[in-house]
Amino acid sequence: MRKFSVALATVLAGVVAACGGGDDNGTAQNASSDGGKAKLEGSISVWIMDPGSPKIQDVVNQYGTDFEAAHPGTKVDIQFVPWAQAHDKFVTAIAGGKVPDVAEMGTTWTPEFADQGALLEQPGITKGDYVSSLVDAATLNEKVYGKPWYAGARSLIYRKDYLEKAGVEPPKTWEEMSAAAKAINGTVKGVFPVGFTGLSEHMYLPTIWQAGGEIATQDGDTWKSALNSPEAAKAIDWYTSFYKAGLAPKASIGWEEPDAQTAFINGDVAMLIAGGWGYNSIIATKPELEEKIGTALTPTGPSGKGTAFAGGSHLVQFTESGNHDLGAAFVDFMLEADQLNKFTSEIGFLPGTTAGIEASGYLEDPQRKPFAEQLLNASAVYPPSPKWGGLEGANIFDGQIQKVMKNDISPQDAVAELAQKMDEEFAG
Amino acid sequence: MVIARRLVSRLTLPVLLLLPALVIIAGLVGYPLVRTVYLSFTDTGLGELIYGGSTWVGLENFKEVFADEHLRTSLINTVVFGTACVVGTMVLGFCVALLLNQRLRGNLFFGIAVLLPWAVPALAASAIWKWLFDARYGFVNWALVNVGFDGFQDYAWFADRESAYVAIFVTVVWQSFPFVALSLLAGLQTIPKETLQAAAVDGANAFQRFRLVTLPLLRPIVAVLVIFSTIWDFKIFDQVYVMAAGVPDRSADTAAVAAYREGFALSHYGLGSAVAVVLFLILLAFALIYVRLVGREGEFS
């Protein structure tokens, strides 16, 4: 017994010593790196994706101002880049050698640019400190190239008044969604049941997971498309059935997500697949809608899952940046829990850090709770392949979906063709 | 010897004066052109562009341009739609020029007003016209429905290639006719009144005077304007980039947009350059044909 407690004490002491040692090392490291850069100085340029609202832009601009105030002699130049042009702009910047020092980057692009050697490795990332799926999305060959900033997943947003008028409950499954759409179409005049668009893969690709399929599978270093499957065909068939039946606006074939959101705000669409950020922006645009709209988890497909895409952003630094220290300091400043929540609460995303989520209070708000639950319990990320960003940038999916919507080809042919195109990209 | 020295001294000044312009042209036009042609024979992607190391693939990219359905369509779109825009611009430009050439009150005002569309940045104009053609809130559908065409209620202009091209055609012509109209107006005003009066005395009616006197005298200007319009309308980018983005399967893309997307969105710089080179050759062919035509006219007169 005595022996045992001695052993225990020894082990405990060892653990404490180990932890202490770790701490010491950490402090020492910080001290030395602090010593190395003694005082932060110089200027950095920062690219942030345009959040589409002046209020949120102000929050970001305030980061720059506060940081400059805390570190005299530094200058932070923040630019807003529209999402739709961001990928092209990064490519051009890297090719031209005119990169920003720090940038927000869509999670699906990080592996692509890291693979080109454009991004700086981020040391000392502990998975427990961040939303782990976002760390996965930033990982290439076991190195992490971006720090998770914020994350979110799309859920169902609906007009309570329209659904009531049509006598239907908020749909929980695909069948219920189809039935609800038909009911609304007959009863609420001038309103389209859904705003399923032709140009937003984050709306239609997750239906493949919901149907029980996969988007791509990894085999060692290479990825292979998994789209040529009955599940994927079923998913695309369901997604496009609304448009074919006239349950979505004729123009929606050429819509992007913001167009669908605008239609929802205008009261032209009854049900919308959108994230917490979309919800915030809808309320901000038309406050009187807050009482009329409800939120729920994404309807579940034949697999019994309502998986949505876990999207979000990393904060990355570029290898070619001239001021790595200042960039790193600014990134860490933006990721402090209270700073982070200023931004995420405005934009309607969840913080990318664990401390940030705890501080957010998201789970206590009934309207916003589904978005948090969707992200934490029913979301997945696209294959973190360096080629994925290119696939997205080229919108290879949209064209095929649009052709199915127009009834030019069958869902089976569409997914078969897509699988072939994906494999070509994965191979090239 | 003396003659040669005199020749050199006579050439020195012109060459010196031309040099700054030549350097700028060589840097801004020559280098990109040579580089694009070079890239079109390589397999350059993003990595090769940054770090070098691309491989020579010969004519592979050009084969791909004509084998790939989307790229081939984009070239056909360019020629067909571009030609339509040139014709539309010239016809409207001519009509407006003839109207402005009449001695009407307020013609100065109209002359200035006509210039305004030309002054709007193409990107802004495209965004505005896209709104005007919006399915539910657009002015065009509203006006058409009010005039009695009920079929245009919620009509989605950009859901089909053909209807999308109608909208883009209106935008392009709206923006490019002012230059043509004013150039033709300047031309019309150089025609001596005596010539027209003489034709009238000989018994030519208004249409005959236009066809037999005005048009032949304007031919050099028309030829130059057609060349300009062809170059502008064949490499049209902004309007198509903004307005045709949602057209199913990107079937309304023109070659310039396709080259950009192939290069910058897909990082296939070699293939994108090949599309650009093919577009360049098409433009060169059209330009040569016109120059020959204009030259022959000169010989006849």
Image (cartoon, rainbow, N blue to C red):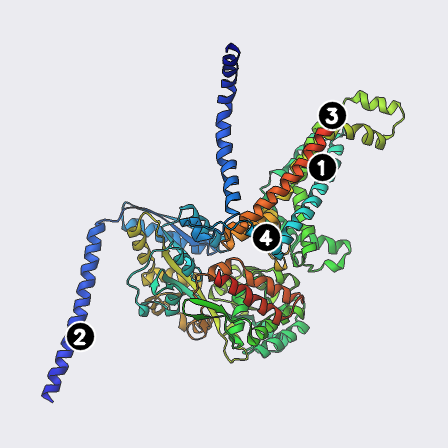
Judge the density around disc 1: few (<14), some (14-19), many (≥20) Cα neighbours within 10 Å: many
2 and 4 marks in contact (CB < 8 Å): no
Q: Which residue is mark 3?
A: B299
Badge number at residue B93: 1
Q: Nearer the viewer, mark 3 or mark 4?
A: 4
- The Cα–Cα distance between marks 2 and 3, rounded to whole angstroms, is 99 Å
Query: What chain does mark 4 sit on?
Result: B
Looking at this view, name the residue that lies furthest to the top.
B2
* Three-letter residue code for mark 2: Val
Name the chain letter of the residue that bears numbered label 3. B
Looking at the rendered structure, the kind of residue marked 3 is: Glu
As measured in the structure, the alpha-carbon distance from the residue carrying label 2 to the one carrying label 1 is 86 Å
Q: Which residue is disc 4 drawn over?
A: B63
**Earlier sequence position, callout 1 versus callout 3:** 1
Under circle 4, the secondary element is helix
Residue B300 x, y percent position in the rendering: 76, 26
Q: What kind of element bears circle 3? A: helix
